[in-house]
Image (cartoon, rainbow, N blue to C red):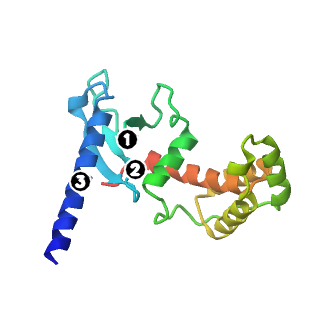
């Protein structure tokens, strides 16, 4: 029993250390690192991502409001940061954020995505023609499309997200694209709302 207690304490200390390092890395990218306030900072289940919210003074000396951030090793990204980085794209940032703190427990509304009838086999065939590394990226396309369709049929979201993502599904003819659209839209709702304190 005592060994389990010591192991849990060691894990907690290691997590605190990882969070402290991530916060220091985020602060170093700010105009006024000393003014940084962090909230709702967590580590992903796999321990490879740290994400949370930071507020700091801008060049005018005022607090700019809480912004979400993601840290992966030595890579730090704040959402909508002006400098270009691989996670600066809002959709990619949302995917990374969701990997760090899954949105599954949150409820965003009661609307379902109005799904069009999509020929997944035809979509996957077209996708395979455009991919350069077919063997690594596309063998599970049909399964992924079926999983995305099942998820979309049971998932409820905000009305504007459902409307936009139904349109995206019609344009691209892919359930997987529609599911990504929903996750990105829900992440946008979280980012607009800000941290829960």
Q: Which mark is residue 14?
A: 3
Disc 2/disc 1 C-alpha distance (Å): 7 Å
At which x and y percent is residue 139? 73, 56
Q: Quadrant of residue 8?
A: bottom left
Give the farthest residue toward the front: 135
Is the residue marked by circle 2 packed among few (<14), some (14-19), or many (20+) residues within 10 Å?
A: few
Work out whether residue 178 can be spotted.
Answer: yes
Depth order, front residue of 2/25: 2
Depth order, front residue of 127/190: 127
Q: Secondary structure at mark 2?
A: loop
Q: Residue at x 52, y 61 (%)?
A: 108
Q: Residue at x 24, y 44 (%)?
A: 20
Q: Which residue is mark 2?
A: 48
Give the farthest residue toward the bottom: 1
Q: Which badge, 2 or 1, comes first in the chain's sequence?
A: 2
Q: Residue at x 32, y 35 (%)?
A: 26
User: From the viewer's perspective, is residue 53 above or below residue 11?
Assistant: above
Is the residue marked by circle 3 packed among few (<14), some (14-19), or many (20+) residues within 10 Å?
A: few
Q: Quadrant of residue 13?
A: bottom left
At which x and y percent is residue 10? 19, 60
Depth order, front residue of 126/6: 6
Is the residue marked by circle 1 packed among few (<14), some (14-19), or many (20+) residues within 10 Å?
A: few
User: From the viewer's perspective, is residue 64 above or below residue 118?
Assistant: above
Q: Which badge, 2 or 3, comes first in the chain's sequence?
A: 3
At which x and y percent is residue 164? 68, 50
Q: Which residue is mark 1?
A: 73
């Amino acid at each position: 029993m005592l060994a389990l207690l010591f192991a849990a304490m060691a894990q907690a200390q290691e997590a605190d250390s990882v969070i402290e390092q991530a916060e220091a890395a985020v602060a170093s990218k700010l105009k006024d690192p000393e003014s940084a306030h962090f909230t709702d900072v967590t580590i992903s289940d796999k321990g490879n991502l740290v994400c949370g919210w930071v507020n700091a003074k801008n060049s005018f000396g005022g607090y700019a409001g809480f912004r979400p951030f993601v840290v992966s090793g030595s890579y730090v990204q704040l959402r909508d940061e002006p400098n270009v980085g691989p996670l600066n794209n809002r959709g990619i940032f949302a995917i990374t954020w969701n990997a760090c703190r899954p949105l599954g427990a949150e409820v965003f509304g009661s609307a379902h995505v109005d799904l069009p009838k999509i020929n997944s086999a035809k979509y996957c065939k077209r996708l395979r023609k455009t991919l350069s590394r077919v063997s690594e990226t596309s063998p599970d396309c049909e399964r992924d499309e079926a999983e995305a369709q099942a998820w979309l049929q049971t998932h409820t979201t905000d009305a504007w997200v459902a409307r936009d993502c139904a349109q995206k599904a019609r344009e691209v003819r892919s359930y997987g694209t529609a599911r990504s659209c929903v996750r990105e839209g829900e992440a946008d709702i979280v980012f607009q709302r800000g941290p829960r304190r």
